[in-house]
Amino acid sequence: MHSVYKVIRIPGGKTLEITMTVDEECKIVYISISGDFFVYPPEALEMLERELQGCSNTDCITNMVSRTHKSAKALGFTWKQLAETITKLYRTACSSTDT
């Protein structure tokens, strides 16, 4: 297992904090998304975190974020920014499991 953490400042001043753990096969086993933003309905973010668990490639991540985007609103970041941030962190986590 390998865990990674990333904090980014979104243009406009909002913060995204993501913690992710992947297993030896590069499957997401844990992810937490937090920061000073709002998602409506609030439970949409928790549902996204649950759906991302089990993703083992970047297409899965993009699809799960896109699915959430269709049913939820975000204030403080765009869904594209979130997908890009999670994808970059995922690639970092997976490259660390290769060693």
Image (spheres, rainbow, N blue to C red):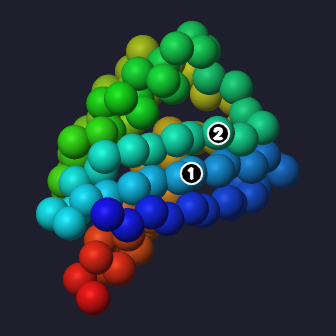
- Which residue is disc 1 drawn over? 18
The quarter of the rendered structure image containing the N terminus is bottom left
Vertical placement of 18 versus 36: above or below? below
Q: Residue furthest bottom?
A: 99
Question: Element under label 2?
Answer: strand
Residue placed at 74% from the left, 49% from the top?
15
The quarter of the rendered structure image containing the C terminus is bottom left
Residue 46 position, x and y percent, is 48, 24
Q: Residue furthest right?
A: 13
Residue 67 position, x and y percent, is 32, 27
The disc placed on residue 34 is 2
Residue 38 seen: yes
Name the amino acid type tagged 1: Ile
Asked whether the beta carbons under mark 2 and mark 1 sit within 8 Å of each other, the answer is yes
Residue placed at 15% from the left, 63% from the top?
25
Vertical placement of 49 versus 72: above or below? below
